[in-house]
Image (cartoon, grey):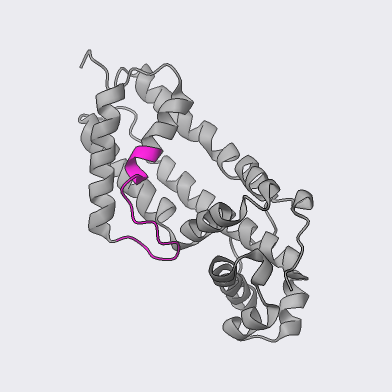
Amino acid sequence: MGYGFCMSTIDLAPPPFAPQATGKLRAILDAAKRAVVRDGLNAISIDAIAADAGVSRQTVYNHLGDKEQLVIAVIRDVTARSSASLMAAVATFPDRPDDVEAALTEFAVRLLDPCMCDIDGRALRWLLERESGRYPELLQTWQAYGPGQDWPIIAGCFARLAANGYLEIDDASVAARHFVALISADLPTAPCTRPPREAVQKAAATGVRTFLRAFASRQR
């Protein structure tokens, strides 16, 4: 029988254990991530997660509670770790590059490889795409916590690049979204498989070239 989730009550505020979870909790969260991607929300089994993590059923309950709380913990954990990786990449954004195409391509690889190509992040996006039709509150809450927190920072980077004369954009948020969409467009979509480095580099280069055709300053 399917398990009924009340997604309208989800709170994805960062939990005290993310992203530093270790030991048994780390094993449980990783096993739960694999289970929800493989089986979907309604079909996950606490017993199967416990066996995969190498712990007892009671240990899972002691750490995370019931199935709904376990799913929430997985989303919190993966989102917090992916966001931390994203911010580390954004800190390297080129503000005054000598070669804007080369600099943005290198940045795109740094953004894709540890962040968007991260297995945890890909698993979370797969889960959201799979389940958001049945649980729209899940997607809405994640968007408010994850992209809702990160996009203004990313947009600010593109606004600075435009202010320094490298881009011609009307809306930095739109430009940032186009950039991320273009550099990730040709990546493989398997949820728990990291794309080869060569595929990441090719996707980054192609996406940046297309982005600059639309947004590069005509004065340079």
The verdict on residue 201 being magenta is no
Question: Residue at image x 23%, y 42%?
Answer: 205
Q: Position of residue 140 (x, y in %)?
A: 65, 43
Image quarter in which the N terminus is found: bottom right
Q: Looking at the picture, does residue 89 appear above or below residue 25?
A: above
Question: Residue at image x 26%, y 32%?
Answer: 210
Image quarter in which the C terminus is found: top left
Horizontal side of residue 63 vs 207, given as left or right:
right
Hey, which quadrant is residue 41 in on the image?
A: bottom right
Q: How many marks?
A: 0
Q: Nearer the viewer, residue 133 or 207?
A: 133
Q: Position of residue 19 (x, y in %)?
A: 58, 60
Q: Nearer the viewer, residue 129 or 200?
A: 129
Question: Residue at image x 73%, y 81%?
Answer: 59
Q: Nearer the viewer, residue 79 or 160?
A: 79
Q: Position of residue 100 (x, y in %)?
A: 24, 30
Q: Position of residue 208 (x, y in %)?
A: 27, 36
Horizontal side of residue 178 vs 36, given as left or right:
left
Query: For the stretch drawn in magenta, what is the main secondary structure?
Result: loop
Residue lying furthest top in this view?
Answer: 219
The part of the chain drawn in magenta is 181-195
Hey, which quadrant is residue 78 in on the image?
A: bottom right
